Amino acid sequence: MYIRDGFIGAIGNTPLIKLKKASEETGCTILGKAEFLNPGGSVKDRAALNIILQAEEDGLIRPGGTIVEGTAGNTGIGLALVGNALGYKTVIVMPETQSQEKKDAIKLAGAELKLVPAKPYKDPANYIHFSGRLAVEIGNKEPNGAFWANQFDNVANREAHITSTGPEIWQQTDGKIDAFTCAVGSGGSIGGISLALKEFNPDVKIALADPMGAALYHYYKRGSLKAEGTSITEGIGQGRITANLENIEIDEAYQIPDEEALHVLFDLIKYEGLCLGGSSGINVAAAIRLAKEMGPGHTIVTLLCDGGARYQSKLYNPAFLKEKGLPSPDWL
């Protein structure tokens, strides 16, 4: 029998899916790592598990303790579910601007959800800083203490991808991979996967995919952090070099506007039956751009980070899209 051991055992070993339309359009083989098939519904299950396991190993969390984190959503969902499986309580701090579906998913998982106004990272009221202070406060009151996951600067995040996602991609492609594209939230996915793939083959090209409103495209292309424009995408877009991004090699960077990402997302549903979140649209759009630059015959892998149902009230809501001046799916 082939059986996975509970929620924890079901994390990882996701399949690679050939993206038919993108591949035909470019003459390359464009593959999506189906991270939406993790049991918590996103790539963040991997980081959540490794962050908690590393905290246990380091003695930073005790049985019955509380995990505290600031998150745009998916890491919070992953931490809550992994926490349930391992016997921890979870408190999640989230900007109130995030989708209702992700807020509901966190509460459904049994975590305590605290919503705060959306503030830039430099503001002490930013959700990340708020969650760090809250972890100290809870830790001083709770008999079993509290642990701040700190996904952005906790390198146990990218270590999850060094040891699992990167090697999985290498094995699933039989080492025949020319490039990898990925957007950045915490930096854990692109940080860990790039380090793993470059260790296997230094010639694998790593391309960063940035939404508008993020600062890393300008940093990797021109050497300074500068944000331009805005985006409706959630959970990605970074304005600083987090610890998970330190010492990684980025070969190319793309800035993907919402219109381009939405066109990709709508095509993935209409022609391939894949309903995905905004970061997947950014990732696949970057893979298409890179494939066209590299020319036919190359194999490019990207991440399909989560499912579209978590963004139905925004990405797939014609009224919301019209309000933002963005295109709608022609079937809605």
Image (cartoon, rainbow, N blue to C red):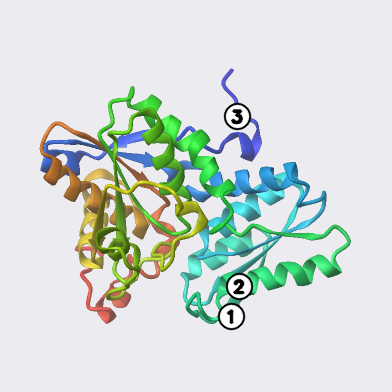
Looking at the rendered structure, which numbered label has been put on residue 129? 2
Residue 306 appears in the figure? yes
Q: Residue pushed farthest top?
A: 1
- Number of marks in the rendered image: 3
Which amino acid type corresponds to the residue marked 3 in the rendered image? Arg
Residue 253 x %, y %: 26, 55
Task: List the residue tagged with mark 3.
Answer: 4
Precedes in sequence: disc 3 or disc 2 = 3
Quarter of the image where the C terminus is located: bottom left
Residue 106 x %, y %: 60, 62
Looking at the rendered structure, which numbered label has been put on residue 73? none
Which amino acid type corresponds to the residue marked 2 in the rendered image? His
Identify the secondary structure beneath mark 3: loop
Task: Tell me the quarter of the picture where residue 112 sits.
Answer: bottom right
Q: Is residue 252 left or right of residue 45?
A: left
Q: Whole-Å distance between the Cαs marked 3 and 2? A: 37 Å
Which amino acid type corresponds to the residue marked 1 in the rendered image? Pro
Identify the secondary structure beneath mark 1: loop
Task: List the residue tagged with mark 1.
Answer: 124
- The residue at the point 25 percent across, 34 percent down is 178
Label 3 Cα neighbours within 10 Å, binned few <14 / some 14-19 / many ≥20: few
Q: Using the image, determine if residue 131 lies above or below residue 266.
A: below
Question: Which of the two marks, 3 or 2, is nearer to us in this view?
Answer: 2
Residue 263 x %, y %: 20, 59
Residue 256 x %, y %: 24, 62
Q: Using the image, determine if residue 173 lies above or below residue 138.
A: above
